[in-house]
Image (cartoon, rainbow, N blue to C red):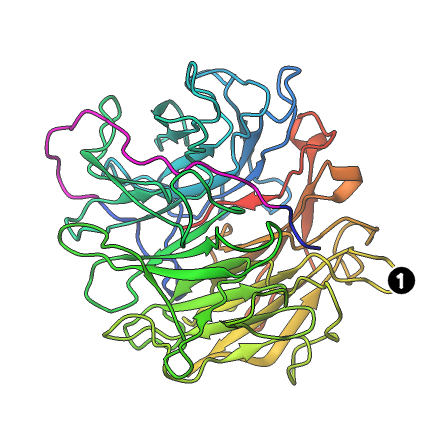
Amino acid sequence: MRKRAIRMTLAVAVAVAASAAAAPVAQAAPAAGGAARVDFNGDGVSDVVTAAPDATVSGRARAGYVAVTYGSRTASLKSQVRKVFQQDTAGVPGSAEQDDRFGAALTTGDLDGDGRTDLVVGSPGEDGGTLDSSGSLTVLWGGKGGLGTGTVIKGTRSRQKLGEALTTGDFDGDGHLDVATGTTVHYGPFGRTTGPARTAAMDVRVNAPDDVLWQTPVLASGDVNGDRVDDVVAIAPHGQDELPYHGPRLLQYFQGSRDGLTAARTLRDADTGETLDGGADLAVGDLDRDGYADIVLGRSSVDDMEGTADVDAVGGAVEIVRGGAAGPDTAGPRARFDQDTAGVPGTAEERDGFGAGVSLGDVNGDGRLDLAVGAPGEDVGSVADAGSVTVLLGGAKGLTATGARTFTQNSASVPGTAEKGDRFGGAVRLADTTGDGRAELYAGAPGENAGAGSVWALPGTATQVTGKGSVSFGAGTLGTVAAKAALGAAFDRR
């Protein structure tokens, strides 16, 4: 379905006091397949965060909360500890307010260099005094007992919506993790009382006035050009001279440097000169293990403007832009997978939304990155928009359709039943929360139970993800308000 346009003010600098220089960040050890481990309590097992940004908290609609699953080598998926954080939780700054949308975007990283991962939560609807929807970032600090107290970075202009998009990486190569938001870049080291060392402007937009951005940007990071400094890749909603619900979500590349992120470069097909369609979601990782991170584009729709190098695949597709010494390679061939690709289960149909959510991780422990692809608009039998998730395995030269599997709520051993509008696969996340070297598949269904939302966890095995031993959880498990919460609308991402 086409999305209505959303106007978003692009504010720039966030003034924050500089902190004293600190020791370089103690980066978390890589998880299997090269994916960064998210480890809030330092026990060596990955944790996962999902969000319910539309949840009612303390009677306030759309205040939002996040739910953390702490990984464990000894506890089963069902019995793993889950804890809810919202702005009325003790130690979390601020208070839950209507339309804050706490958890609309999530990113992670060891920002203060203590060896434990920290969580950054975006609240784009937060008001800052008289500033309407200026937004905020809440950093929840990791510790021996998991996440605890927090620090807030506030937006500085009305309609800035700080925290609508987030990613972390070392964008200036100084050994400290930084946080990019689409309007600002907050450079580490971070102090728990002083915030980031410095803040600079970031401009994710294309031919739009300063105060306008259509739809919501998406950010991801990785070392695309192999220079040992992280870069940012952004899906940038086009903002000018088009119908408000129509037009390409263009792809921008912000190269990291010793001075920080450089100005955006909008990516174009090297042969045709057409701008690349960024799609709905993206992930960044070294699929072929050549030392350059590749860009996975989840292009869930065929609705694009003339002059855009789009996929034109019914029901959506994922496409790979390879990394190289010069950055994203838009001249070479781009591998593509859709539901009509040989080996990929299912059949491509209009509005499947294949690619609406993408996540990289190693599900079978072979050291290669695999890909989870959400298709929340997939019909299961005659049940409309029940949703599905497909897992593509990594091979010697990158992703392959060989051994691909698709899961729905009607798959064997998967809890629940496919129902109209569940939108299973609306968000996906691969993470090894059992410590066995194989990532579990976490899938959100924000439409489950009339919009309450739920989350599923499916185990990884030596061959593929399986429904056997899978679990689900929702408001009943978490002790939260169910109505219209959209639990599972987002997961933490790098």
Residue 238 within the segment the image draws in magenta: no
Pick whichever, 112 or 20, lies toward us. Answer: 20
Read off the residue under disc 1. Answer: 382
The spot of residue 159 in percent (x, y) is: 46, 30
Quarter of the rendering occupied by the N terminus: bottom right
Q: Is residue 476 left or right of residue 40?
A: right
Residue occupying image coordinates x 36% and y 35%: 11
Pick whichever, 202 or 482, lies toward us. Answer: 202
The spot of residue 472 in percent (x, y) is: 69, 45
Instruction: Kindly report the secondary structure that dominates the magenta region of the rendered protein.
Output: loop
The spot of residue 373 in percent (x, y) is: 59, 63
Pick whichever, 266 or 377, lies toward us. Answer: 266
Which of the 4 image quarters holds residue 473?
Answer: top right
Can the viewer see residue 204?
A: yes
Instruction: Count how many numbered circles sit on residues in the image.
Output: 1
Can the viewer see residue 439?
A: no
Residue lying furthest right: 382
Instruction: Give above or below for 317 relative to 219.
Output: below
The spot of residue 123 in percent (x, y) is: 48, 30
Q: Is residue 311 left or right of residue 110?
A: right
Q: Amino acid at mark 1?
A: Ser
Element at badge 1? loop
Residue 12 within the segment the image draws in magenta: yes
Instruction: Give above or below for 146 relative to 234.
Output: above
Pick whichever, 84 or 94, lies toward us. Answer: 94
The magenta segment: 5-25
Residue occupying image coordinates x 44% and y 74%: 274
